[in-house]
Amino acid sequence: MPSLANTGALKHLEGKEKLLLRLVDLSVQLNSTLDLDELLQLITATATELLECEAASILLYDEKSPRLFFAAATGSNPVKLAEIPVPIDNSLAGTIFRTNKPLILNDADQDPRHYAPVSEHIKFKTKTLLGVPMPIKDQVMGVLEAVNKHSGNFDESDSSVLSVIAAHAAIAINNARLFKARQQALEKVRETNQIKSNFLALASHELRTPLGIIIGYSAFLQEEARGASSEHVKHVLGAASQMRSILDQMNNLTLLQTDEMTMRPMKIPMQDILNFAIDEIKYIASRQDLTLVYAFEEKPPLFAFADPEKTTLAFVNLLTNAVRFSNDGGEVTIGAVKQDKHILVWVQDKGKGIPADKLQKVFEEFYQIEPPNTRSYGGLGIGLSISKGLIESQGGKIWAESEGLGKGTTFKALFPLRE
């Protein structure tokens, strides 16, 4: 028969094994949730269970004002506890927080540092108390307390267990806070983007009616006007057409943002799309005396599966951008070539160029390399965003290449080849 000593040793080992398994299980649970309230309840419940005590509580540091506050507790009303600020000075929790050391008090109600307003407010008498700091990196984020052990007093073994729980809890709470802050930031971004999208849609819609009237009357007047009046009407029509183009861009951006852009893909030669796009910008290119260089052959056709209208618009925007940032008398090249199972298309200018750190940012909505108040080039800064959205929504890729300011820019797009 095993001796009493051996039996005691076996029971001790079994107890240790059970404790370790419970701590491992707690660690898994803490790492599997990012809900802060759920985490706090799990921590206090586990501490109460493992230390076999009446209650446990978590006090966190309030960075806005130098104090601690009850974030969660078992055995008491957490709402009532949260009403009581706990000072850093002249309180047991504050002492643990400041010294960053555990504290065992088996006559807590007699200690002068015992903060009586807490017990009075919730009608709870603290007899024995064990508190440990909750470390995160080189700081303390709060205090984990266990009170009123059911049998006997708190000891160093209890302090070790509670410290392990506190260390895991601090990491989990910090992660949950970071996740919550990230979610709140994302929500603000979503709200801002929604406001922006609503404004674009509203402005585009509301301005179309008066703009249509201006264009209609201008066209009517152009038929009747003679001499200088005819030239004035021509300027009005030109400005109105430019404004309509801006409204179309705003509308296209809104449709892309809300995933309401309708695509009607078909098998079509990429050369046809590029020719359509070039026809759209020939006039503005000629006004700057720019030479358009065709770096693609009509045959054999490079078939893509794409929406002709939307893909043409994407390249019109790229070409318009190239023309806008080219010097008068320069040239703009548009090319296409088969590259493995893809079609590589490029639009190259020899104008202003883009700094290396701005090559990705130029595709952001409303981004302008130049300051808005001193820029020398027009546009809303959404043409490239629209091109990117239209190309990527059809399974393509787009990027910019430039050797720097004054060395021109090449925009490249890759489309799946449809044999």
Image (cartoon, rainbow, N blue to C red):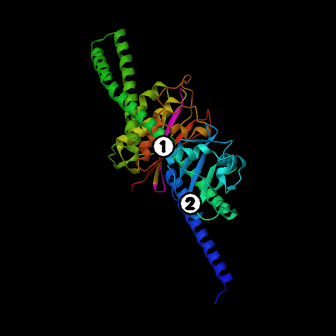
Task: Out of 74 and 370, give the one closest to the viewer.
Answer: 74
> In the figure, 203 relative to 181: above or below?
above
> In the figure, 5 relative to 366: above or below?
below
Q: Identify the magenta region.
A: 328-341
The residue identified by callout 2 is 48
Residue occupying the far bottom of the picture: 1
**Disc 2 vs disc 1: which is toward the camera?**
2
Task: Out of 39 and 199, give the one closest to the viewer.
Answer: 39
Task: Report whether residue 134 is seen.
Answer: no
Number of residues whose C-alpha sits closer than 10 Å to that of mark 1, classed few (under 14), some (14–19) or many (20 or more)? some
Residue 307 on the magenta segment: no
Residue drawn at point x = 27 percent, y = 12 percent? 224
Amino acid type shown at disc 2: Thr
The residue identified by callout 1 is 335
Task: Report whether residue 114 is seen.
Answer: yes
Quadrant containing the N terminus in the rendered view: bottom right
Q: Is residue 196 left or right of residue 373?
A: left
Amino acid type shown at disc 1: Gly
> In the figure, 310 relative to 235: above or below?
below
Give residue 4's quadrant in the image: bottom right
Residue drawn at point x = 60 percent, y = 65 percent? 151
Chief SS of the magenta region? strand
Which label's residue is closer to the chain start, 2 or 1?
A: 2
Residue drawn at point x = 29 percent, y = 19 percent? 219
**What secondary structure is marked by label 2?**
helix
Give residue 26's quadrant in the image: bottom right
Residue 57 % position (x, y): 57, 52
Residue occupying the far front of the picture: 110
**What secondary structure is marked by label 1?**
strand
Residue 198 % position (x, y): 38, 33
Number of residues whose C-alpha sits closer than 10 Å to that of mark 2, classed few (under 14), some (14–19) or many (20 or more)? many
Quadrant containing the C terminus in the rendered view: bottom left
